[in-house]
Image: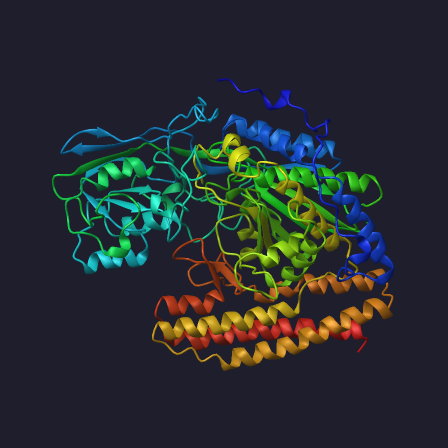
């Protein structure tokens, strides 16, 4: 089946389908947005009202259809075509568009892999999803076998050890149970940690290969694809297994991997100097994994290690069962390209409000990531039209499409390293849109200072199905009554990491989610999406409105509307959590100095918010004074930047939050303290408390300086 070229598709949808779109909340019913002078509120709300009319379902649908018509992993010719489509759409929308190419050390696109049972009988194991009559994309000739980026290459045959989720504690328990891992092939189910750590721990314990599978016990009680949205027996979760102590190109830590033809000097490491995995790694569906597990003859695994397969999960396979894993994965410098569109600000063009998502998938990527990509294009067209009609932003709005995220958050990290100074000085916020649209349930995670602005934006946009606002729907989700929506904290696993954890740009993630079990598989395609995701294509445009409101408010506010008091509220929660974690580990975390510093910050932050709101009503600040105030606000998050970096991870500089270094995905709050607890190092807790007291005190001093400036003290 030969798919139509991207270039044959229209860039902008011209025919508007007749659809029901809930009206936006009336301007007179909305509270004045934070950070605006009273005389500027009406103009802001008028522009927001115009925004509500622009994102359309058919527009979002067409972008998604075009982007996902062919598999387009990083480094492929199809990915180049998608990149050009992004350029064309944003240029047509009136944005200034630039491309940022890098030469990255990446696995080459190959499906040269084998998995098979050798004894007691020879069985070839499936390494690709089955073709389905109900899924017109599942037989695409360019689809690859299941593979893991940054696997080692090798051809190994050996006995099998089952390691549950392959977590650090799982391998430790295997040793306690007397299981010999040396020279064995480890089979582990997905979940519990980042897949790369399964490989890292297996290799450290002497394993010669790793097999990973998605267990049906993780299905959510709904039908398997194609009858329902969840994984079937052949669904394979691909993914990178890169586990370095920095993010980005493996050969150029801390500096951008400029292209070889750029003329710019790049200090590239030799690949032999980089701690890449040496052993071969393969993912497979649970049907193939079951054929191994049901032939294992050793002692039964602990009860909580059992999954959803109709077999007895056992620790070892025994001497009679041998399995072969073969992976041929060459790696070389590969061109990757970030695409960034800019709506240039009319007054402070060097101050940046940023939105972004990667655009490289493992296959088609209708959910991950291109629901977010299509939403960003829809948003770009709306903001471009607004700018042309008199609603141009005062500050610049940037929309970034990052390459090579799936291989290890690489493209965005290189861009962050290239623009480290500009981001440190001028970046107001980064909002991530990875996999942002796949169902009806709204959710958000963010740094403290963006929680208030995000909540306010959701109050300004109607939910498309129920006559309520997005905020009201979000607030009512779940069984318990709440006074505010539940908002998460950012961890690892996507493109916010460089912005937030490396340079300290306040960051967030907003999205509409739903059911799904086709993560990183060849079934994550338009056929799945139109049946089980956003099948009316209404949630993408809704998110474009929420993000559009957020963008306009951050770009147009007289005083940046950061939620400054939230720093103290969240810090108190995190400090108490650290205390509880220490107690669970048999330690005492004496954090009275930190609690005292947080209490002082709370008082100062509340006084600041009062002074800000009063000054906006009572005082007319000259433009240069407002600019200086906002520069001070941009600097608040930098109070948590620790120049030496975190323990063993100098690239990760945020004292406030970081990815869990032992699982990869989870969010560690106050990670300097958390690390000492997790590594059973109670003696260092006092040192790290002092580090945190200094950071919180610096933040308090910055907030007090802002308050004094606003109050005219």
Colour mode of the rendering: rainbow
Residue displayed at 84% across by 60% down? 623
Is residue 260 in sight in this rendering? no
Q: Which of 690 and 196 is in front in this view?
A: 196
Farthest residue in the top direction?
2
Residue displayed at 50% across by 43% down? 410
Q: Which of 319 and 629 is in front in this view?
A: 319
Q: Position of residue 291 (x, y in %)?
A: 24, 36
Q: Where is residue 415 in the image (x, y as percent from the top left)?
A: 58, 45
Please indicate whether residue 103 sits to the left or right of residue 45 in the image.
Answer: left
Q: Does residue 237 lie above or below 351 as drawn?
A: above
Please indicate whether residue 126 sits to the left or right of residue 589 in the image.
Answer: left
Task: Please identify the quarter of the rendering in which residue 378 is found.
Answer: top right
Q: Where is residue 630 in the image (x, y as percent from the top left)?
A: 74, 62
Task: Please identify the quarter of the rendering in which residue 402 is found.
Answer: top right
Is residue 377 in sight in this rendering? yes
Q: How many marks?
A: 0
Please indicate whether residue 700 sits to the left or right of residue 281 in the image.
Answer: right
Q: Does residue 613 lie above or below 475 as drawn?
A: below
């Amino acid at each position: 089946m030969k798919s139509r070229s991207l270039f044959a598709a229209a860039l902008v949808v011209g025919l508007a389908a007749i659809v029901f779109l809930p009206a936006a909340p009336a301007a007179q019913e909305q509270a004045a947005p934070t950070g605006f002078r009273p005389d500027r509120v009406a103009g802001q709300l008028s522009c927001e009202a115009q925004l509500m009319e622009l994102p359309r379902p058919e527009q979002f649908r067409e972008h998604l259809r075009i982007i996902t018509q062919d598999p387009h992993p990083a480094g492929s010719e199809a990915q180049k075509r998608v990149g050009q489509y992004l350029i064309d759409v944003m240029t047509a929308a009136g944005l200034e568009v630039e491309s940022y190419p890098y030469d990255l050390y990446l696995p080459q696109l190959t499906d040269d892999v084998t998995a098979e049972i050798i004894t007691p009988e020879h069985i070839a194991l499936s390494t690709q999803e089955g073709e389905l009559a109900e899924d017109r994309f599942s037989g695409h000739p360019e689809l690859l076998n299941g593979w893991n980026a940054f696997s080692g290459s090798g051809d190994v045959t050996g006995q099998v050890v089952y390691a549950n989720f392959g977590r650090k504690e799982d391998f430790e328990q295997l040793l306690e149970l007397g299981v010999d891992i040396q020279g064995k092939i480890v089979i582990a189910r997905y979940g519990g940690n980042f897949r790369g750590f399964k490989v890292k721990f297996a290799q450290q314990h002497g394993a010669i290969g790793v097999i990973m599978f998605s267990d049906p016990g993780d299905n959510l009680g709904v039908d398997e694809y194609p009858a329902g949205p969840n994984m079937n027996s052949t669904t394979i979760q691909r993914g990178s297994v890169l586990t370095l102590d920095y993010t980005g190109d493996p050969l150029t830590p801390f500096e951008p991997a400029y292209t070889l033809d750029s003329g710019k000097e790049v200090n590239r490491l030799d690949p032999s100097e980089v701690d890449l995995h040496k052993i071969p790694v393969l993912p497979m569906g649970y049907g193939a994994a079951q054929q191994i597990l049901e032939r294992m003859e050793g002692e039964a695994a602990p009860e909580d290690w059992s999954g959803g397969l109709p077999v007895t999960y056992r620790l070892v396979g025994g001497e009679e069962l041998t399995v072969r894993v073969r992976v041929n994965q060459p790696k070389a410098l590969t061109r990757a390209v970030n695409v960034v569109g800019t709506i240039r600000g009319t007054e402070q063009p060097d101050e940046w409000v940023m939105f972004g998502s990667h655009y490289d998938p493992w296959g088609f990527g209708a959910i991950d990531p291109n629901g977010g990509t299509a939403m960003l294009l829809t948003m770009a067209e709306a903001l471009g039209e607004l700018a042309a009609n008199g609603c141009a932003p005062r500050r610049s709005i940037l929309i970034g499409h990052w390459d090579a995220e799936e291989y290890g958050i690489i493209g965005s990290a290189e861009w962050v390293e290239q623009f480290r100074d500009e981001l440190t000085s001028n970046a107001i916020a980064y909002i991530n849109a990875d996999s942002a649209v796949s169902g009806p349930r709204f959710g958000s995670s963010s740094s403290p200072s963006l929680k208030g602005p995000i909540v306010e934006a959701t109050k300004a946009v109607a939910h498309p199905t129920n006559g309520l606002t997005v905020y009201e729907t979000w607030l009512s989700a779940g069984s318990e009554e709440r006074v505010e929506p539940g908002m998460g904290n950012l961890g690892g696993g996507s493109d916010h990491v460089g912005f937030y954890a490396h340079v300290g740009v306040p960051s967030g993630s907003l999205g509409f989610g739903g059911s799904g079990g086709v993560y990183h598989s060849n079934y994550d395609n338009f056929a799945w999406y139109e049946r089980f995701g956003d099948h009316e294509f209404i949630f993408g445009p809704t998110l474009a409105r929420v993000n559009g409101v957020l963008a306009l408010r951050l770009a147009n506010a007289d005083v940046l509307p950061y939620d400054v008091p939230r720093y103290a509220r969240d810090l108190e929660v995190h400090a108490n959590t650290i205390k509880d974690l220490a107690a669970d580990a048999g330690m005492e975390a004496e954090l009275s100095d930190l609690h005292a510093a947080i209490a002082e910050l709370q008082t100062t932050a509340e006084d600041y918010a009062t002074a800000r709101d009063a000054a906006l009503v009572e005082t007319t600040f000259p433009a240069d004074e407002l600019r200086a105030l906002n520069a001070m606000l941009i600097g608040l998050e930098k109070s948590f930047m620790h120049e030496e970096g975190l323990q063993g991870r100098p690239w990760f500089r945020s004292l406030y939050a970081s990815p869990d270094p032992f699982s990869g995905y989870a969010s560690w709050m106050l990670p300097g303290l958390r690390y000492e607890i997790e590594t059973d190092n109670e003696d260092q807790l006092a040192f790290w408390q002092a580090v945190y007291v200094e950071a919180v005190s610096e933040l308090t001093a910055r907030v007090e300086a802002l308050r004094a400036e606003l109050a005219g003290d």
